[in-house]
Amino acid sequence: MDITALSEALDQIEDGAVVHHGFTDYLRDYEVVVYMTADPTTSIPPAHLRYLFRYCVAARCETSLVPRVWQKSLDDRLIDHATADGLDGWVWGVKWANLERARVLPESDAARRWADELGIDLHTVRIEMQVHDLDLVFSELEITELPASWEK
């Protein structure tokens, strides 16, 4: 996959809302579903975009919340938006996180090692969200718009 095209595709989703991420049910590819909206004056309807990172050999997800916020966010009432009202801490129940930055990283040792083993080009991407940072090592990116009725 062309690095310039990959960078441009990632630029398109900055400022979107990540509503789901994880390995697909067949466990080879990693998907990130982003809810995109536009200024209402543009008449562009909102859409769910599925970014499918194909042949994903490594996925690392780590919190981006600082420990003091995590400490205040342990209450199980925070996992449901309806019961979180008035509580102090991260409301997990909002079920989305701002996508703050997505970028291609310089070639990593993992990408180089796996590329040599598999005989295909691999890339490393970092996706920084409001609550998680995600590093993926993969070969190809496939982007599709999901139906309006999509729900995870």
Image: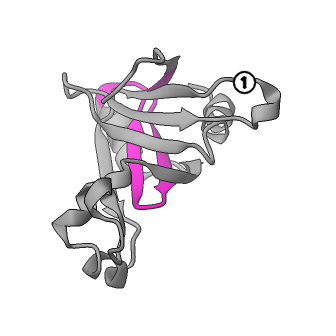
Q: Which residue is mark 1?
A: 44
Percent coordinates x, y for residue 20 in the rendering = 36, 39
Numbered disc total: 1
Viewport quadrant of the C terminus: top left
The picture quadrant where one finds residue 80 is bottom left
Above-or-below relation of 134 to 131: above
Percent coordinates x, y for residue 116 in the rendering = 35, 34
Percent coordinates x, y for residue 108 in the rendering = 44, 51
Dominant secondary structure (helix, strand or loop) of the stretch shown in magenta? strand
Residues in magenta, as a range: 118-143
Q: Residue at x 58, y 43 (%)?
A: 16
Between 32 and 110, the one lying in front of the other is 32
Q: Residue at x 41, y 67 (%)?
A: 64
Q: Residue at x 34, y 43 (%)?
A: 113
Between 38 and 80, the one lying in front of the other is 80
Asked whether residue 71 appears in the rendered view, the answer is: yes
Q: Residue furthest top?
A: 147
Viewport quadrant of the N terminus: top right
Q: Is residue 61 magenta?
A: no
Amino acid on which disc 1 is placed: Ile
